[in-house]
Image (spheres, rainbow, N blue to C red):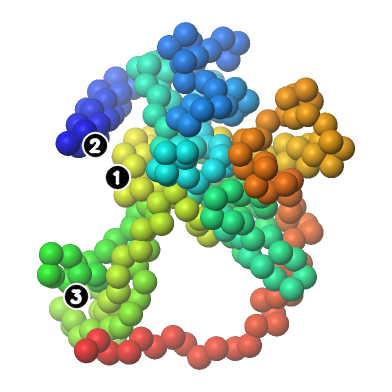
């Protein structure tokens, strides 16, 4: 019941917020953080680290001044935080902030899982991310500045719900980046719910608009990986995904993802030199830093050739043909 009330509260807030949006509203100064927001700043679960908020606000205010966004809310993510909190629930590392309405919300989110190749191991564990990259095909998160773009909804197949075969559609929110994240579209980087349909077979369904030339549609089971790893996209629980996408659909806003390549290099250098991150003015979640040892940023110029070589080495496979459902 508490979850339902929270969701209804958010939906009501969302409707009021978007109804009151006007281009004339000026962005707040980045020089001071409002008192109501300060209580949400910190290192505890559900709080946002100071540097993440500072950069997210600066990006949002810059885009508001340029007229690129008019949404009263902005988004941020801290990919250095663990997937699971001390309570055992999904760790909260994705933030929705609406300063005009004094609204702050922290939810779970997935990060890129990476790959383990012969020439380079840039895979991430289930609990903490240590590898980051903007290379296409790396399946890694790239920190930096984004603006939400259009959405695309696609059919994934059928699954069984309440004893009936039900179509599963997933909405994908595209991101446009800048700088190191400028190739977000090339990488098909965006946000979506942390659910995929694991195909098992195909069944005769000629009346379906999604049937193939032979009249078959795929069937499988839904897999929910909320708070876990993704193929490089930002992922949320189904409920949070609906809320976030409805907030920005047709009304883009900014998304800042921490850490950027410069942060990763600086933290790695400090760890190697045995320096204190806080004294060096650097930030990384302490729990995850103990887990990963030191982070690594794999720039596109170095990692892309390795990925391309690996792809060329793969043997040609016949097209996948699902068995007929029994």
Can you identify the residue that label 1 sits on? Answer: 239
**How many numbered discs sit on the rendered protein?**
3
Asked if marks 2 and 1 touch (Cβ < 8 Å), the reply is yes
In the displayed structure image, the side of residue 168 where residue 120 appears, left or right: right
Q: Secondary structure at mark 1?
A: helix
For the C terminus, which image quadrant? bottom left
In this view, 305 is above or below 87: below
Q: Earlier in the sequence, mark 2 or mark 1?
A: 2
Q: Residue at x 43, y 12 (%)?
A: 36
Mark 2–mark 3 Cα distance, whole angstroms, equals 35 Å
Q: Which residue is mark 2?
A: 3
Q: Residue at x 45, y 30 (%)?
A: 46
Residue 208: mark in rendering: 3
User: Hey, which residue is sitting farthest front in the picture?
Assistant: 87
Marks 2/1: CA–CA distance: 10 Å
Residue under the image location 51 percent in, 28 percent down: 44
Secondary structure category for the residue under label 2: helix
Circle nearer the N terminus (2, 3): 2
Say if 236 sits above or below 154 in the image.
Answer: above
- Give the alpha-carbon distance from disc 1 to disc 3, as whole Å: 27 Å
Q: Nearer the viewer, residue 304 or 94?
A: 94
Structural crowding at the residue carrying mark 3, measured as other residues with C-alpha within 10 Å and reported as few (<14), some (14–19) or many (≥20): few
């Amino acid at each position: 019941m508490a979850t339902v009330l929270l969701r209804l509260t958010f939906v009501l807030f969302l409707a009021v917020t978007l109804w009151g949006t006007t281009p004339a509203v000026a962005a707040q100064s980045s020089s001071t953080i409002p008192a109501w927001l300060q209580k949400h700043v910190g290192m505890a679960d559900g709080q946002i680290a100071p540097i993440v908020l500072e950069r997210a606000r600066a990006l949002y205010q810059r885009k508001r001044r340029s007229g690129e966004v008019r949404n009263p809310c902005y988004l941020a993510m801290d990919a250095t935080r663990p997937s699971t909190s001390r309570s055992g629930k999904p760790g909260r590392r994705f933030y929705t902030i609406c300063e005009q309405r004094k609204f702050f919300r922290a939810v779970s989110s997935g990060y890129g899982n990476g790959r383990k190749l012969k020439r380079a191991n840039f895979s991430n564990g289930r609990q903490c991310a240590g590898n980051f990259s903007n290379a296409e095909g790396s399946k890694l998160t790239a920190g930096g500045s984004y603006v939400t773009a259009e959405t695309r909804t696609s059919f994934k197949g059928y699954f069984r719900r309440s004893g009936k075969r039900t179509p599963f559609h997933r909405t994908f929110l595209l991101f446009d980046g800048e700088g190191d994240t400028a190739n977000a579209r090339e990488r098909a980087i965006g946000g979506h719910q942390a659910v995929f349909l694991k195909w098992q077979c195909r069944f005769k369904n000629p009346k379906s608009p999604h049937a193939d030339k032979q009249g078959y549609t795929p069937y499988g089971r839904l897999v929910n990986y909320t708070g876990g790893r993704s193929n490089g996209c930002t992922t949320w629980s189904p409920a949070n995904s609906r809320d976030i996408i409805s907030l920005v659909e047709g009304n883009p806003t900014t998304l800042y993802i921490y850490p950027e390549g410069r942060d990763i290099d600086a933290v790695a250098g400090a760890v190697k030199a045995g320096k204190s991150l806080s004294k060096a003015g650097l930030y990384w979640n302490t729990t995850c830093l103990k887990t990963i040892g030191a982070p690594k940023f794999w720039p596109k110029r170095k990692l892309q050739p390795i990925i391309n070589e690996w792809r060329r080495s793969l043997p040609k496979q016949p097209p996948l043909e699902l068995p007929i459902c029994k």
